[in-house]
Amino acid sequence: MKHSKAYWTRIVALFAVLSMVVAACGDSSSDTTAASGGGGDEQIELLVWASRDYYRPPDLWAGFMEDNPNINVTVQVESNDDILQQMQRMQDAGQRLPDIIQDDTFLIEAYQNAGLLLDHTEQKDRWESEDPDTYNTILPIAWEENTFGGGIWGVSLTANFDVIYYNLSACEAASIDCAGITSLDQFLDAMRAVKAADPDIIPLTVQAKPGTGITTLKTLFSAAGAPFDGAVPDLQSEGGLYVLNWWLQASDEGLLPPQAISWGEDEARGAFAGQRAAFILDGFTVAGEFNELDGFNLETEWNVIPSPTQGSGNQISNARTWAITSETPYPYEAMLAIRHVGSVEQLVAAADNGSVPMRNSEALADPRLDTIWPFFNEGLRAAYSGSDSVPAGLNGGEVELVLEELFGEIVVGTDKTAQELADEYQLKLDDL
């Protein structure tokens, strides 16, 4: 049968329409779901590995899954601090990797170096485009400290930071206003004053046991403006020599406990909580622990101020980053799950669950924090919001071992000068 030209025109048009329908139905990729805000038909399984239970959103993504019924989130807490090593083994064995990981920000470069992370630039831009109100509350440092190597490799939504806790009765006995300490010079003078008022008190309790970290040393290098090359501080700089001399004076004048060479966190914190010490420089999270101790009351027995600085120095904050892994087939949905973690409601609820301060301006101003963290005053919030990232690098672990050796030598006592220590240990650091 011979058909007219009009007939064949209709047939061709019909095939064109059918082709478009088939293409649309067959595109069940992440982009199709993205267009509908994560509510597509494809059933998606997201696996999340978090390094601590209190960093997970308290609702464990229940609200997110209710809003996105096609997405199921399974979360595992891997608290042995070996997520990176596990993923490298899984990658070598061809096993499925988690879609999202959460780990220390100083490790993110190692993850990226191993090819385990996705460049987040596209997903970051989509977040800004789709939800600018929430996106604009995230502090810039959350992205900046994960930006290197030509990409953005995650977002750090929370961070711990070091503060000074002080013993109110020790300060009163020495007739000093510890709340007014803002510089490292003032801090050293306050330690001298409490020692003069009470020879039996420990002016500054520290931990110096090998393997327990050197938080106080890194914090003071940054506070005095010592430059860092990755994780390596410049000990021979003006700021580096200032800090070494600061610690040498504290040690020589008996302001540090020499037995701290065998002290870890428990011993150092126990001395302060037992009111045997006037000061301790420690993480913000410890405030919650102190606040729960019977007979050791905020604003009666103890209080807290930002870590003091000197010259061009600044406070630093030690963050944890949420990151999308390189092999996930669902990068958009993974970022939606991270966006849920970064919401004000989840960040404030996490604070009540033992988490750390948030990199979100709206959450930081939330009045509920006044009840959750009564010690988180305006001074601490301002210091936290303006803090820099902890200096980091692929050789960070090796650097820490050298700095532990240096700090231990100072705590037990040495005849070396600050310059001699700087020259000796800078050679060790530069060889790493």
Image: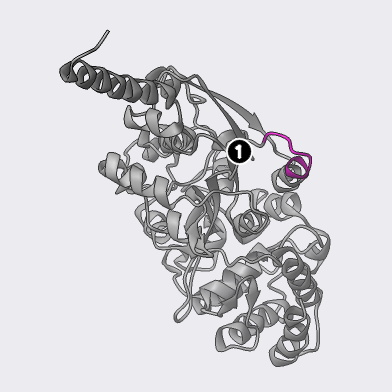
Look at the image and say whether residue 90 sits in the magenta stretch: yes
Q: x, y (%) of residue 159? A: 51, 51
Write the residue at 70% across / 48% down: 84
Q: x, y (%) of residue 331? A: 48, 39
Write the residue at 38% across / 26% down: 23
Return the residue at label 1. Answer: 293
Residue 289 seen from this side? no
Q: Is residue 103 above or below residue 309?
A: above
Display colour scheme: one colour
Left or right of 36? Residue 292 is: right
Identify the amino acid type marked 1. Leu
Q: x, y (%) of residue 184? A: 52, 75
Q: Which residues are magenta?
A: 89-96
Look at the image and say whether residue 337 sits in the magenta stretch: no
Quarter of the figure with the C terminus: bottom right
Q: x, y (%) of residue 177? A: 44, 66
Write the residue at 60% across / 55% down: 108
Q: Is residue 332 above or below residue 19?
A: below
- Toward the top, the furthest residue is 1
Viewer-proximal residue among 176 and 173: 176
Q: Write down the quadrant of residue 99 in the picture.
A: top right
Quarter of the figure with the N terminus: top left
Question: Are there few (<14), some (14-19), or many (20+) residues within 10 Å of tag 1?
Answer: few
Q: How many marks?
A: 1
Q: Write down the quadrant of residue 282 in the picture.
A: bottom right
Viewer-proximal residue among 73 and 183: 73
Write the residue at 20% across / 15% down: 7
